[in-house]
Image (tube, rainbow, N blue to C red):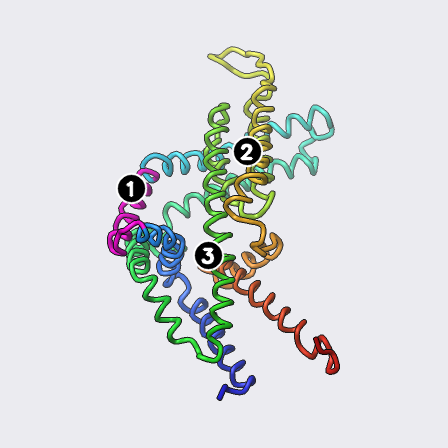
Amino acid sequence: MALPIEQQAKYWGIATAVVFAILWFLGDVILPFVLGGAIAYCLDPLADRLEKLGASRVLATVTITIVAILIFCLSFLLVIPSLLEQAGQLVNTAPDVFERLRVALTERFPSLIDDQSVMRKQLSSIGEAIQAKGGALVEGLLTSAKGLINILVLLVLVPVVAFYLLLDWDNMTARIDELLPRDHAPTIRKLAGDIDATLASFIRGMGTVCLVLGAYYAVALMTVGLQFGLIVGFIAGLVTFIPYVGALVGGILAIGLALFQFWGGTQMVDGASVEVATDWFRIGAVGVIFVIGQVVEGNVLTPKLVGKSVGLHPVWLIFALSVFGSIFGFVGMLVAVPLAAMIGVLVRFGIEQYTEGRLYRGLDKQD
């Protein structure tokens, strides 16, 4: 005999509260396990595919781990140093960008020449603030271990956790299935399947889209000679999972830097004043790069890799990232998308049950 609905709601409520309490109290302590679990979840389909080709689970896991470590080492040696260097240079260049903007505005609005002008003070303060806070942020990311526990611990623990979770993933899911309440097992399996489909489409698919677009933007921008092409491509790819935001943020940043770098004017070369013409071709090329990226993303990458039925609205994603990030910190931001997907599936299931129930249809409505 099934438990009354009140007791079921109580037990499920307690389980939910325990999960949130763990996130709240443990926080950064569980960060390596959250990252390792996310990596294992993303790599599980690849391990299953290798198993279908005849490899054992151990061989599949070891092969994936070796390839992943090689890719990480190559990235760490070839890409990450340049990325950090460009990030620092971009932060230090910000005051010069705003100084160029101030000069351009001064030519159009002579009143800005006045030292007491509000606009001039604001532009100067913005540039100084970006340099100070941006520099502090980059320095903090490089020197502080408190936000991410300890970089060395992460680099050691995350691959180990991911390896063992990937190795035992099928056994763990089978064991969890055995422990499901028998009366609700079919419903839970259906909901779990819907959540997995949503996560697979969004996290795995959108992760691939972000990686492809980030690499494309970085390579293309560096090809046309943009000074900070690598970091701009990284930023644009990183936020591509929110539709249009990646291209908008990256495009504005790239075009602004292109105007700063390729706009004509008087420059000092070997102590002499030289007049440099505006390079309209490169400025236009930067804009075309982002237009092409949006066309390819909207018509090829997203439909093929993500699909159309993910069910995660951009506003819902932003809200989830903001709420979970503010409450649970960095770990909250990591689990925001999976939890948003789960909540979305549960809400749709609840709406479906509501529209089929008496509260919606009425006591006398029967199909």
SS type, badge 3? helix
Q: Could you tell me which residue is drawn at 48 percent across and 80 percent down?
A: 183
SS type, badge 1? helix
Q: Is residue 72 magenta?
A: yes
Q: Choose mark 2 or mark 3, whichever is in front.
A: 3
Asked which quadrant contains residue 35, the reply is bottom left
In the rendered image, which quarter contains the C terminus? Answer: bottom right
Q: Earlier in the sequence, mark 2 or mark 3?
A: 2
Name the residue tied to disc 3.
334
Q: Which mark is residue 256?
A: none
Q: Is residue 305 above or below residue 251?
A: below
Q: Which residues are magenta?
A: 53-75
Q: Inspect the image, locate mark 3, and give the three-letter code of the amino acid beneath it.
A: Leu
Q: Which mark is residue 95?
A: 2
Q: Is residue 191 left or right of residue 174?
A: right
Q: Is residue 111 above or below residue 36?
A: above
Name the residue tied to disc 1.
70
Q: Inspect the image, locate mark 2, and give the three-letter code of the amino acid beneath it.
A: Pro
Q: Could you tell me which residue is drawn at 58 percent across and 50 percent down?
A: 308
Rounded to the nearest angstrom, the CA distance separating label 2 from label 1 is 39 Å
Q: Choose mark 2 or mark 1, whichever is in front.
A: 1
Q: Is residue 289 above or below residue 50?
A: above
Expressed as whole percent of the image width and height from the top left, the position of residue 237 reads 50, 41
